[in-house]
Image (spheres, rainbow, N blue to C red):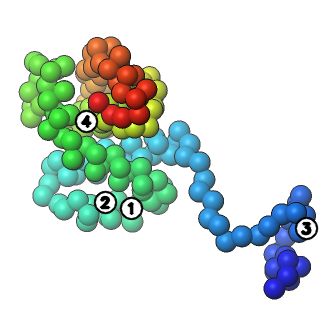
Amino acid sequence: MDDSTVLDGYPFELENFDPDVDQITSEVVQPEQYAADRSIARRASLQILYELDTTDHPLAATLDAHMIERPEAYAVRQIIRRFVAGVIQRRAEIDAILQTYAPDWPIGQVAVVDRNILRLAVFEYLMQKRATPIPVIVNEAVHLAQLFGAEHSHSFVHGVLGAITSEMAPEAELAADEGEAP
């Protein structure tokens, strides 16, 4: 089949397309992940983590249900799966870090929403290879606390993350420079 018959099937004119130079392929091009996509992923991940923390629902069923119910979450499902799986796999380590930086608040007594916002932020900050700027992680976590938490949740989340990031920043930067998570 030549290019002219392929192009004849398009219902619109392809601008700047030169069939002698440009090739039509079946290659799938993945769109870039934008900041808004990561915000959607954080919100959905928080909701999934909350559900898993308060029920005995299995992980796979919970993920599937959230993807079906929320089309915007389906579009960023890979990020959500990475966030949720990462927090679940490293929960004991994350909780130990949180306990160190919020010693007056036993992790089991922290509100479920706040606890999972903090877990998600600590995972993204310390345990992921992708380098998201610290202010973005903190701002997103505070925003989630404002949306879903109690009246003063955002202050608590900001305080704990501020303590973690100010003390652990050099350690995290060193790990990022070496290409691995601490």
Q: Is residue 73 above or below residue 99?
A: below
Labelled disc at residue 119: 4
Question: Can you give x and y, in whole percent of width and height, for residue 84 in the image?
Answer: 30, 49
Label 2 sits on residue: 63
Residue 126: quarter of image? top left
Q: Amino acid at mark 2?
A: Leu
Label 1 sits on residue: 67
Distance Cα–Cα, label 2 vs label 3: 46 Å
Distance Cα–Cα, label 1 vs label 2: 6 Å
Callout 4: SS: helix
Residue 162: quarter of image? top left
Residue 155: tell me if it is visible.
no
Q: Are marks 2 and 4 in contact (CB under 8 Å)?
A: no
Distance Cα–Cα, label 4 vs label 1: 21 Å
Q: Amino acid at mark 3?
A: Asp
Give the camera-side residue of 81 and 169. 169
Q: Are marks 1 and 2 in contact (CB under 8 Å)?
A: yes
How busy is the neighbourhood of tag 1: few (under 14 within 10 Å), some, or many (20 plus)?
some
Labelled disc at residue 20: 3
Q: Are marks 1 and 3 in contact (CB under 8 Å)?
A: no
Q: Earlier in the sequence, mark 1 or mark 3?
A: 3
Distance Cα–Cα, label 1 vs label 3: 42 Å
Distance Cα–Cα, label 2 vs label 4: 18 Å
Does residue 48 appear to the left or right of 69 in the view shown? left
Does residue 177 appear to the left or right of 118 in the view shown? right
Q: Amino acid at mark 1?
A: Met
Residue 55: quarter of image? bottom left
Does residue 42 appear to the left or right of 11 in the view shown? left
Q: Nearer the viewer, mark 1 or mark 3?
A: 3
